Image (tube, rainbow, N blue to C red):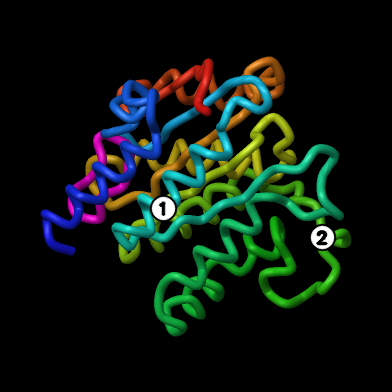
Amino acid sequence: IPKAGREAFGALLAGRFVGRQSLMSELRDFLPSGDNRPGHIIATLSGPPGIGKSRLIHEIKIHAQFHDVPFLHAACQQGGEAGIRCFERIVREALTLNSSADTQRLMRQYKNSFRALFPGLLGESQNFSSARPIQPESPQKHLDQVARCLIEIAETTPFLIALEDLQWIDETSLGLLCALIRNMTAAFNSKALPQVLLTHRAEEARGLDTVYELLSKFSQLVIQIRAMLLI
C-alpha cells in the first residue's frame, strides 16, 4: 500500500475518533502497521459499560485489516457460553493463518496440550460442553505449549488478539492469557510476536489481579488506558 494511501487512511481513522485524538496518540505505538515492530505488544483498556470500548475494538480492527494484519477477536461471556472457552476461538483462528502443512505440523507437535485444553480442536468432541479439564499432572506445561504455538504462528504471520469483557474470562482462558504474556515477554527481543488488546469493565476487575500483577512486571511493553469517554 503506497505511503500516501496509508497517510490518507490515518487521517480518515483520526476523523472517526473526533475528540479522542489523545487516546489515539496513546495507542500510536500499539496500532499494527504491518511494516515495523510495534513499540508495545499489549494494550489494556478499562472503563464502565457503554463507554465505547467495543467501538474502539472495531476501529482497531479496521486499522489492522487495512495493514493486512489478521485480527482475532473473542468476547468473554458472563457465566460462560455453553462451555465454550473464549480463547479457543482465538486458537482456532490462529491455526488457519499459515499453510495447511504448517497447521498440520503444529497440530501434531502440540496435540497433547490441545487435547488437554481444547479437545474440540482435534475433532475429538463435537460438544464443547464435554471438553475435558486440564490434565492435573502438568497444567502449566500445557498452557505454555499452546502459548508457544501461538508465538510460532506469529513468527510467520503476525496477528493481533482482542479479548473483550475480560472480567468474564473463563479459568482456562485466563491461564492461557497469562502464559502467553509470560512467553511473549521472554521472547520480545528475538521474535516477531502477536499483539494483545484487552478490555474490561473497570469496576469488575477483581478477578484480574493475576493478569495485572504480571503486566506490572513488563510495564515497558504495555499501554494501560483507563477510559472515561470513547463515544
- Magenta span of residues: 29-39
Quadrant hosting residue 157 = bottom left
Indicate the quadrant containing the N terminus: top left, top right, bottom left or bottom right.
bottom left
In front of the other: 149 or 91: 91
Q: Is residue 134 above or below residue 29?
A: below
Quadrant hosting residue 27 = top left
The circle drawn on residue 164 is none
Q: Is residue 74 above or below residue 149?
A: above
Tell me what residue is drawn at x 82 percent, y 73 percent. Answer: 126
Left or right of 133 in this view: 46:
left
The circle drawn on residue 131 is 2
Left or right of 203 in this view: 79:
right
| Residue 228 picture location, percent across and down | 53, 16
Q: Is residue 15 above or below residue 193?
A: above
Around disc 1, counting alpha carbons within 10 Å, would you say few (fewer than 14), some (14 to 19), or many (20 or more)?
Answer: some
Query: Residue extending furthest left?
Result: 3
Tell me what residue is drawn at x 50 percent, y 42 percent. Answer: 57
Around disc 2, counting alpha carbons within 10 Å, would you say few (fewer than 14), some (14 to 19), or many (20 or more)?
Answer: some
Q: Mark 2 falls on what kind of element?
A: loop
